[in-house]
Image (spheres, rainbow, N blue to C red):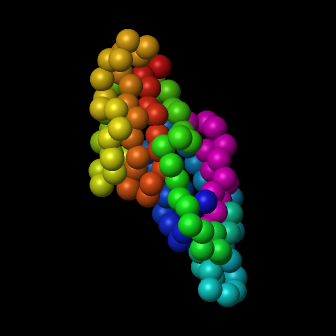
Amino acid sequence: MFDGAAEEAMNFYVSLFPKSRVIEYNCYEAGDSKGKLQQGNFTIAGREFICIDTPIKHDFTFTPSGSIFVDCDSLADLEHIFSALSTNGEVLMPLDNYGFSTKFAWLTDCLGLSWQLNLA
């Protein structure tokens, strides 16, 4: 759930990950949310997700306690995705070998969504 940036987020994420695409999206047609994303269905690395722009203001946003975990097929993809997602975001665990993975990173992107990226 985003507060006005759902379509931007969906298109950004789809552009970064192989095997990703927008499936369908609908925008609000009236009211204060007119033109914002009512619901977007898309895939990231072959997994389906839904995002929305909330028409209601909430006192909460994303937290790192819920994150999207993605296995990357190549080091080049992992490094590219990490660089793009961490720009203007916050790195929680830098890209490194942590024993459970030869290359792993945990970050929050510029839109507040938390990601765990792993080299498969």
Tell me if 46 is positioned left or right of 119 in this view. Answer: right
Q: What is the x, y in percent for residue 13?
A: 48, 49
In the depicted structure, whether residue 41 falls above or below residue 33: above
Q: Residue sitting at 41 percent across and 46 percent down?
A: 108
Q: Residue sitting at 35 percent across and 38 percent down?
A: 92
Q: What is the x, y in percent for residue 113?
A: 48, 50
- Residue 78 falls inside the magenta stretch: no
**In the depicted view, which residue is nearer to us: 51 or 19?**
51
**In the depicted view, which residue is nearer to us: 96 or 78?**
96
Q: Residue sitting at 50 percent across and 27 percent down?
A: 71
In the depicted structure, whether residue 106 falls above or below residue 11: above
Which residue extends farthest top? 99
Tell me if 111 is positioned left or right of 49 in this view. Answer: left
Look at the magenta stretch and give its main secondary structure. strand
Tell me if 10 is positioned left or right of 16 in this view. Answer: right
In the depicted structure, whether residue 119 falls above or below residue 28: above
Magenta span: 40-53
Which residue extends farthest front? 59
- Residue 42 falls inside the magenta stretch: yes
Residue 18 in sight from this viewpoint: yes
In the depicted structure, whether residue 8 falls above or below residue 31: above
Which residue extends farthest bottom? 31
Q: Residue sitting at 67 percent across and 87 percent down?
A: 31
Q: What is the x, y in percent for residue 111?
A: 44, 58
The mark total stands at: 0
Q: What is the x, y in percent for residue 35?
A: 60, 79
Residue 37 in sight from this viewpoint: no
Quarter of the N terminus within the rendering:
bottom right
